[in-house]
Image (cartoon, grey):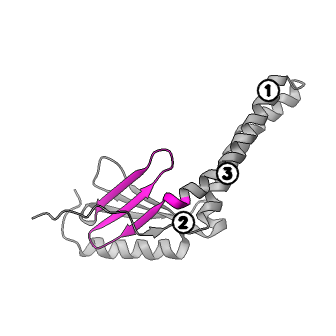
Amino acid sequence: MQSTLPLRPPAHRVDPRARQWWRLRGLGVAAVVALPQLVVALVLGGPVWLWATLIATVVVGLGYAAVVPEILFRIHRWEVTDEAVYTLSGWLVREWRIAPISRVQTVDTEHGPLQQLLGLASVTVTTASARGPVAIRGLATAEARELARQLTETTQATPGDAT
């Protein structure tokens, strides 16, 4: 007999340093877009329309970096119980995922360059789902390591074939 998982928001926030990670990522994207605009504007002698797009890119990038990381921090939540992995993420499109432990196939941790710099990591839980893996991003490195260990132990102790 299959039990129904409770629908509720996940309990845990991501690490507060995740705000800085999201901010740096946003500024990096803005820089990647603005730098070629700046180079072309300087090479072409600076048509007004090109300087205007460059300024717009910088303003939007700075606005994103100032506002969006705070929104993401308030929204992103996660929790792992003996029955399921719960996540809530997104800012324009919010995604609430519940993955039963019996469906977990693999647990991975990831530490990108910015995450390493800030002492953060991500945990990706691959499930037998067409929706794809469940990701918990912005965790402290030690917390991600412990979460991966806990999930691995819980998954091994849970009957089922994860299909």
Q: Quadrant of residue 163?
A: bottom left
Question: Is residue 129 something that shows in the picture?
Answer: yes
Tag 1 residue: 50
Camera-nearest residue between 56 and 24 = 56
Q: Whole-percent x and y of residue 89? A: 46, 55
In this view, 60 is above or below 12? above
Question: Is residue 28 something that shows in the picture?
Answer: no
Residue 70 is labelled as none
Number of numbered discs present? 3
Tag 3 residue: 65
Magenta region, residue range: 73-100
Sequence-wise, which precedes: disc 3 or disc 2? 3
Side of 109 where 3 appears, left or right? left
Side of 41 where 20 appears, left or right? left
Q: Secondary structure at mark 1?
A: helix
Side of 121 where 27 appears, left or right? right
